[in-house]
Image: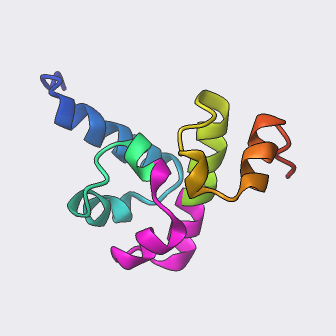
Amino acid sequence: GDMPATPASAGAGEVASFLRSVGLETCQTALEEAGYGSVEALGRATLKELVDVGIKPVHARLIVSNLDSASTLNSVGLTPAHNRPSFDDEALLGGGVRK
C-alpha cells in the first residue's frame, strides 16, 4: 500500500516495525497513547516509565534492551549524560557492551 508519508505515520511505522521485530506488536497502542511516537522517543524511556504506561515488565525489559543495543550502534550519546549513571557512558563510549 502506498500511504502518503506524513511525519506522524512515519514515526508510528518506525515504532510498529520495531515492535514487530521483537514480537511485541501488542504494546503499540499503549506506547502511542503514552506519546512514544518514534523509536527515538521510545529509546529515551526508562523501564519504569514503560511499566507506568501499562507495558508488562517483561515486555518493557525487552523493549529497553533491544533499543539500548540499537541506539548504541546508531547514535551514542542520545541520552543526556546527567540522565544516566556515568559508568554507563563509559561503557558506551568504550564500546564495552559485553553480552
Where residue 92 appears, as percent x and y from the top left, is 75, 41
Where residue 73 appears, as percent x and y from the top left, is 66, 32
Please tell me whether residue 56 belongs to the stretch shown in magenta.
yes
| Displayed quadrant of residue 80 | top right
| Displayed quadrant of residue 84 | bottom right
Q: Is residue 80 above or below residue 10?
A: below
Where residue 20 appears, as percent x and y from the top left, is 44, 49
Residue pictured at 59% horizontal, 38% vertical: 71
Please tell me whether residue 37 belongs to the stretch shown in magenta.
no
Q: Is residue 79 left or right of residue 34?
A: right
82 or 45, nearer to the observer: 82
28 or 81, nearer to the observer: 81
Query: Which residues are the magenta region?
Result: 43-63
As drawn, the residue found furthest toward the front would be 82
Residue pictured at 47% horizontal, 51% vertical: 44
Q: Is residue 6 above or below residue 47?
A: above
| Displayed quadrant of residue 83 | bottom right
Q: Is residue 96 left or right of residue 75?
A: right
Q: What secondary structure is the magenta-colored segment mainly?
A: helix
Where residue 82 appears, as percent x and y from the top left, is 58, 53
55 or 1, nearer to the observer: 55
Residue pictured at 53% horizontal, 58% vertical: 63
Quarter of the image containing the N terminus? Answer: top left
How many discs mark residues in the rendered view?
0
Residue pictured at 27% horizontal, 42% vertical: 12
